[in-house]
Image: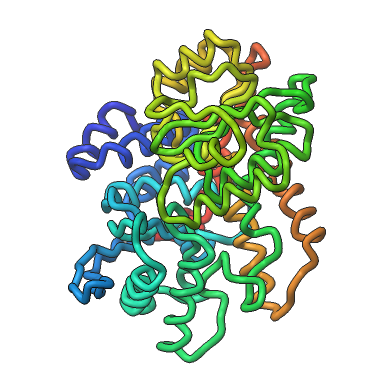
Amino acid sequence: MYKLDEFMAELERKNPAQPEFIQAAREVVASVIDVVNNTPKYLNNKILDRIVEPERVVQFRVEWEDDNHQIQVNRGYRVQFNSAIGPYKGGLRFNKNVTVGTLKFLGFEQIFKNSLTTLPMGGGKGGADFDPVGKSDNEILRFCRSFMTELQKYIGPDTDVPAGDLGVGGREIGFMYGQYKRIRQENTGVLTGKGQTWGGSLIRPEATGFGALYFTNEVMKLNNDTLKGKRVIVSGFGNVAWGAVTKATELGAKVIAISGPDGYVLDEAGVSTPEKIAYMLELRSSNKNIVAPYAEKFGAKFVPGKRIWEVPCDIAFTAALQNELNGDDAKLLIKNGVKYAIEISNMGCTPEAIEAFQAAKIPFCPGKAVNAGGVAVSGLEMSQNAEHLKWAAADVDAQLHRIMENIFAACVKEGKQADGYVDYVKGANIAGFKKVADAMCELGY
């Protein structure tokens, strides 16, 4: 029989200085440990011991030349965590703070997120400690080519299919796919998030944000509520936040604030016009990582150096980084009347924040369920590539909507408590775990 504290103490001993991975593992293990202890095949097959160990961790040197003709050196990684239900699938993150511990946390989360989609995708994650902020397009091109020269040795359409993530958008995917083609001399579905003219799926850029709002809409319906007229805040301003703002506006909500590392913008008129929403993408592509220009362009209020969570709202979405919303932020949101707390970023809330929301009986929905729409449409892109077909946007969107409704139903089934409150964290973890654990048992060891 497994005991949570003993298991986690041993895991922490084996993975020192990886707090994000330990945090992610504790959340999942705490949710599923009773299921494991009450299921003989999970116990006999040592599923918990096996599922927290990556199948493979690859690290490599990335050498590239900057615009001053100076050689720069970064570290590249690919964590291939679990392939029980399909090829490794997960994004690539370019950020100066990337470490193997960061990617292990993200890859571990990806296992269960991908499982929830019901598509045949395992879990993985990769990236580099390369900071794209302030780099020229040519510098980013040279880095991407060097990075892919190494990464291509370990990936393939039936082995490992990376996508984008923080710091990696359509431009970077294009540069990397171009290098993959030069080296391998083939057109395959080896990356997702590709451009529309070279194998990409319609609505993929919007998918994470759209899927998050489809999930949120189901939460609202369960609570006899609606998105119409709700005041919404969204951290971040990249692809994920852009998709969420677009769909939230379409469904009748009013997004009043977005944020960046430099502070947040309060737009009481609403981030609601096509011009305002499109400008979010201009900010992302500028490589400056700031939101202040939005306020100047549209006459909104810019609050420098402050956290967006001080803005009173009905719904708070995390859409930037892990642990961006802490316990004090959660208490402030609750004090100011927040009704729903929704993670779109991976592990966007600290454990203290989650505890605060759940103690107040505010519906809290975890990223591994809410943001699964992105990888779901990546999975659909893989299917289109395999069939050498391109589906209509309406068909992709309909499948995305269905997948998110099914994920919501699975979370409710596994997470509904006696008093009617839904523990979406527990529900998502158990639903995602069972499919992977069953596959691992059936495949042997």
Any part of residue 368 in sight: yes
Which image quadrant for residue 142? Answer: bottom left
x and y, in percent, of residue 112 in the image: 51, 46
Q: How is the image coloured?
A: rainbow
**Position in image of residue 228 (x %, y %):** 79, 27
**Between 20 and 213, the one nearer to me in the picture:** 213
Could you say which is closer to the camera, residue 200 or residue 89? Answer: 200
Identify the residue shown where x is 48% and y is 91%. Answer: 185
Up-down: is 379 above or below 251? below
Residue 46 seen in the figure: no
User: Is 384 positioned to the left or the right of 74 in the image?
Assistant: right
Q: Which residue is drawn at 53% across and 12% down?
A: 334
The part of the image, by quadrant, that contains residue 270 is: top right
Residue 259 higher or lower than 94, as above or below: above
Relative to 309, 99 lies left or right: left
Q: Position of residue 65 (x, y in %)?
A: 25, 75
Looking at the rendering, in which quadrant would you find the C terminus? bottom left
Q: Where is residue 33, by image quadrant? A: top left
- Say which residue appears at 37% left-offset and 60% top-offset: 126
Q: Position of residue 226 (x, y in %)?
A: 78, 25
From the viewer's side, name the closer residue of 39 and 28.
Answer: 28
- In the picture shown, does residue 439 fall above or below 407? below
Instruction: Locate residue 291 relative to residue 200 in the image: left or right.
Output: left
Residue at 56% x, 27% y: name it: 266
